[in-house]
Structures are given as C-alpha cells and as structure tokens.
Image (tube, rainbow, N blue to C red):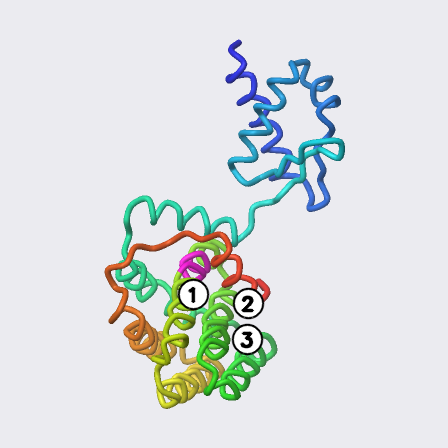
Amino acid sequence: MPQRRIAETVAAELRSRILTGDENYRLPTQDQLVQDFGVSYPSIREALRILETEGLVTVRRGNVGGAEVHRPDETSAAYHLGLALQGARVTLGDLAAGLRMLEPLCAAECATRPDRAETVIPALTENVDRSAELIDDGVAFTQTAREFHDLIVSFTPNLTVRYVVSSLVALWSAQEQAWAETLTRRGEYPSPGDATEAVRTHRRLVKEIAAGRAERAEQLYRTHLAAAQTLVLERFEGGVVTASPTGVRSAMQSGAPRI
C-alpha cells in the first residue's frame, strides 16, 4: 500500500482511540506505534501530521518530543466553523441573521428547564449584577454582557443545539469584543445609556425565564439581540467573519462553563 494510505489508516485508528478514550488518554511513543501497527516510522510520522492538522494532537519535536492529545471541544468546533465561514466569505450580517434565528430558541429552552430556579437563574442574575457595575467601562462591559449570551446557550438542554449555537455565539463575541476595543480606543464607544438599557433588558429576560414564560422569553431575546447587533452592524455589516483561534478561545473562556 502507498505510504499515504497506510498513514491514513493508522490516523483513522488513532483518531478513533482519541475520540472514544477517556480524557487522560495518551498516545503511545512512536517506537510503540511502529511495533503495534507493523509499519515504518515515516508512515507513523505522516499519520501524526494528519492528526495534527485536525487539531487532535500537537507533535513536539526534539529530545523531549512526543504527541500531546487534544480532545475536540466547543472552542475547536467554533474555530473550524469559523474557518469554513471565512473561506465562504460569509459576512457579519449573515452571521448575525443566523444568530437571530437560533439563539432566541435557547432562551425559550432555558425557560422550560424544571431546575431553572436552582441552576439557570442564579448564574444569570450574578452576571447581570456584574454587568451593572461595569457600565462605564466599555470593553469590560461588552465582555461581561456577552457572557450573558454564553450562559443562555450553555444552559440549553439539547447538546447538539448547544454545540452549534455556542460556536456561532463565540464567533460573534470575538467580533464584538474587537469592535468594543476599537471604538474605545477612538473614544467612540456607545453611551452608558445604551449599556444601562442592555442591563435592564437582561433583567427582564431573567424574570421571563424564571417564570417559565418560554414564548415571551424568546420574543424578548430576539428583539434584544437585533438591537444589540445593530451597534456592530452599522459599521461592519459587510465585513467577513474572521476565524481567529485566539479571539475565539478568548470569547469561549470568558463565558460560562458548559453545563
């Protein structure tokens, strides 16, 4: 068999081990892999390169070399989705429209959770209280207010919806954080009045979710999301989505732990 095909076969088996193994799974050494698969060192190295391009391993060269395993998570999902959108020249306006379709559904799902009073509401309330304290700090307020959206998505019960929407939210958050930093440097960040209104709307959303009014929560969320997006889109609507691993990682890490 050609070396490339052998490498792809080995990579497929190692990929399966990584995805089905536990979080502490470690790849064997190259010597052990050569022995286990009965193939050459170049084939093993090519297999590891395949996995490295997929973000599943990081190959360290030199005397302390080896392969570090990375299980895929929401950050990697957002980044690779971002690459696809950037490659397709998807605009921020298109991304925003997609979020207006999908993200409000997450608010409705939060309102249907029977345990929302113990899990969802305390986290949302704490976030809104922190936002209210940061109204005069544009960048910090934007980051904390975006965490509210991260929380809403993170409490969505359906895992498939959670992963898809959280990836889109992370991409938008990265763009919005960059927008806030740019406008702050220029002294053009929106007024504290706009931030105050956002806090007020977030408090209303918490009340609707707490009361279990799913339809009203979804409607209010959709209206609020469209208004919040306008601030960014009026300047950058035609801009293309940018998949920055640093920006996406920052947006994901600043948000809520996934529930």
Please, what is the three-letter code of the amino acid marked with disc 3? Val
Secondary structure, mark 3, is helix
Q: Is residue 197 left or right of residue 238?
A: right
| Marks 2 & 1, CB-CB < 8 Å contact | yes
Label 2 and label 1: CA atoms lie apart by 10 Å
Chain part drawn in magenta:
165-171
Q: Residue at x 61, y 24 (%)?
A: 45
Any mark on residue 254, and which? 2
Any mark on residue 202, and which? none
Secondary structure, mark 2, is loop
Any mark on residue 173, and which? 1
Q: Where does residue 14 sit, x and y in percent of width and height?
A: 62, 30
Please, what is the three-letter code of the amino acid marked with disc 1? Ser
The residue lying toward the viewer, choosing from 241 and 151, is: 241
N-terminal label among 1 and 3: 3
Q: Residue at x 44, y 69 (%)?
A: 109
**183, above or below 193, in the image:** above
Foreground mark, 3 or 2, reads 2
Any mark on residue 120, and which? 3
Q: Where does residue 104 sit, x and y in percent of width and height?
A: 37, 69
